[in-house]
Amino acid sequence: MSMAPRTDTQSPAPHVADSHDLIRVHGARENNLKDVSIEIPKRRLTVFTGVSGSGKSSLVFDTIAAESQRLINETYSAFVQGFMPTLARPEVDVLDGLTTVITVDQQRLGADPRSTVGTATDANAMLRILFSRLGKPHIGSPKAFSFNVASISGAGAVTMERGGQTVKERRSFSITGGMCPRCEGRGSVSDLDLTQLYDDSKTLSEGAITVPGYTGGGWNSRLYSESGFFDPDKPIRKFTKKELHDFLYREPTRMKIAGINMTYEGLIPRIQRSMLAKDREGMQPHIREFVDRAVTFTTCPECDGTRLNEGARSSKIERISIADACAMQISDLAEWVRGLDEPSVAPLLTALQQTLDSFVEIGLGYLSLDRPAGTLSGGEAQRVKMIRHLGSSLTDVTYVFDEPTIGLHPHDIQRMNDLLLRLRDKGNTVLVVEHKPETIAIADHVVDLGPGAGTAGGAVCFEGTVEGLRTGGTITGRHFDDRAAVKETVRKPTGTLEIRGARTHNLQGVDVDIPLGVLAVVTGVAGSGKSSLVHGSIPAGEGVVSVDQAAIRGSRRSNPATYTGLLDPIRKAFAKTNGVKPALFSANSEGACPTCNGAGVIYTDLAMMAGVATTCEECEGKRFQASVLDYHLGGRDISEVLAMSVTEAEEFFGAGEAATPAAHRILTRLADVGLGYLTLGQPLTTLSGGERQRLKLATHMAEKGGVYVLDEPTAGLHLADVEQLLGLLDRLVDAGKSVIVVEHHQAVMAHADWIIDLGPGAGHDGGRLVFEGTPADLVAARSTLTGEHLATYVGP
């Protein structure tokens, strides 16, 4: 049967299904967004930019990604939804054209001691199967190679009904796990330094116990001196073996002291239960200081830090155990796996090979699978999450990235850009929140939010191409081609901090003198050993203030006023003026509205449906009892003070009736780091990444220290905010402080007085000092990757 030839030459009209090529957002009001309406092209790379706090994350994560996730969750049964996080519908009128969203955010990977790079990426799961199939001698299933599974066995009688009769049968079971029994799969064991607990030259009556809360004749110290197990007037070093055991390790024993029933317990289990069982961040500062001093972590002597028991370490493939494989640098492990030729496990080897190659491709080949997940920087954690998406066959999905270039050297940014473009070219929509000009430059479409931050932001200032952004007149457009010039003259150091033979992680015996009294920048490609050098050789403590990238802890009740300690002087000022207790002016204490317990809203849990938060009718969202709002300071009540911005409050507490020097000092520091627009009572959970980083910096600036160590302070900062940060660093140095910055941003490098460059590569290809000198010398020499990029940045 022959086909009739087509006679019409016109192309057919496009199918109606192909017309949905836009994501339409209309009337978005989440957080500080002001009725934002935009259209985002699908299957293109769209970059969202704007100053920190302008509403980028509110639009991309809290509106577009959140609604897509909510709609997907609704497709599951009510039973399944009951186990999933419940999401409320974002504040938006219309969201049209959404596709499935895959979010790759900056949330740090869990810092659980048993979480490693291998367990977080499933590479360990595949290795365990590999060793359970090919390892010699064969020791068991994949569980036998897991440091999260303990070996257990048991036996006993089981009673059951069978054929109308009760039958008893003997059953036994055993599970072979890989967990080291000594450290329980943690790789390290903690020990208490006894010299920090007591002074053995003194007697208990003389106050030998030096633990906080056990001094000064209180109940804790009386428990030991009046227990009757030892002589309180005898120096501890003269205790007999039994007396020392009773003092340190005795089991709980009921007794009467001064007519009161009490439980006596050895000092060590008592401290472990009362102090060490708590979260370090939740401890009072003096307790935290004691714990840091008294608790020592040492590598587990039984498993040598591998976390695995002897059985798991004995099974090998070509003389390599699973512990050896996890300790290898991933780029080396990928080569080893490539050399295995076993047809029986070919699909497994292929999948493992792809995962390991993805690590190398994304620039994380210098990590090892046994690296604790909690030690990864924000940028490394984000790239680890990207690994599972690189080889994905899915198309037509929306990938959402939150500043994927954080923690990347300019040399590595090009590689990240290639990955983003590859994801787009597979037919995906890629949405990126970003500040770096190098990544903004590759965008197909740019959305610039602003014009300011907080209440001054939340509007779309520009939508269009990168070229249009350059000439658009927005803050981002004006600063897009900013280039900091290398300093003509640099400050002279007032001294040096000597580091000799540094070998933390991949450092290879680095000797370096870090100049003091100047702005010193430590740089190098990701994984070259910068943080290892700075944090490993300059411990935070006496005279050193360290501001790292660890996340800020805080619930929706926490706000800038509580986090910075600003609320204490404010409460005291209110209490003094009105002659009442300071606790009345806390929404978490006596002053809280009884209906909503000081939350300002009432949460109604609706099981698998999104919970509803309604403003409390009693306090109208002010969080305080009505009687508390009758007390005023300078004509304002406490709820009005918490609704002020930092700039307003700085003026309010600076002079006049409400003048409070302690509060004014904290507010000045917040304004110095560029947070003048934040309101004092804004929940910490609504702050952006850049805002949290600067809030932490403002808090640490109050600490007494001569040396400030900052870990990538430009993370989350807009190009315009970087200038303000450089001004702040200059003021710190001019005030006589020494500032050491771990940084990749070329503007900070150019502004430095001294640069220390590590490299030349990452992992075992790095860890060496490749340059130290002034930025001008580094540009002139162009002898390192950093030098080449900095020379290109500052121009001829």
Image: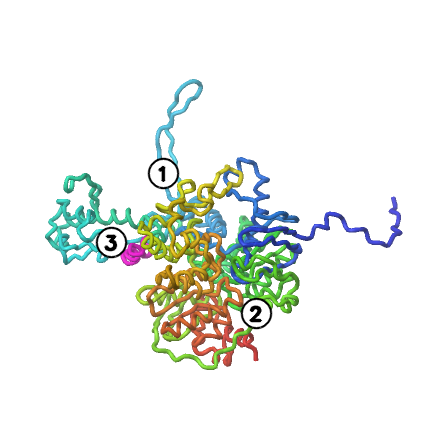
Looking at the image, residue 200 sits to the left or right of residue 157; the answer is left
Question: Which quarter of the picture shows residue 387?
Answer: bottom right
Q: How many marks?
A: 3
| Residue 137 is covered by the magenta coloring | no
Coordinates of residue 189 in the picture (x, y in percent): 32, 53
Residue farthest along the top direction in this orientation: 164
Residue placed under numbered mark 2 in the picture: 479
203 displayed left or right of 475: left
- Gap between marks 2 and 3, in whole Å? 52 Å
Residue at 58% from the left image edge and 69% from the top image edge: 480
Tell me where the magenta segment starts and ends, as one range: 283-301
Q: Is residue 468 above or below residue 227?
A: below
**At 59% from the left edge and 40% from the top edge, which residue is drawn?**
75
**Residue 571, how many percent across, how many down?**
35, 54
Residue 212's disc is 3
The residue lying toward the viewer, choosing from 567 and 11, is 567
Q: Amino acid at mark 3?
A: Pro
Q: In the image shown, does 112 or 739 lie closer to the viewer? A: 739
Question: Which residue sits at x=11%, y=49%?
Answer: 231
- Whole-number angstrom distance, CA of label 3 to CA of label 1: 43 Å
What residue sits right under mark 1 in the picture? 153
Q: Earlier in the sequence, mark 2 or mark 1?
A: 1
Q: Looking at the image, is mark 2 or mark 3 nearer the viewer?
A: 2
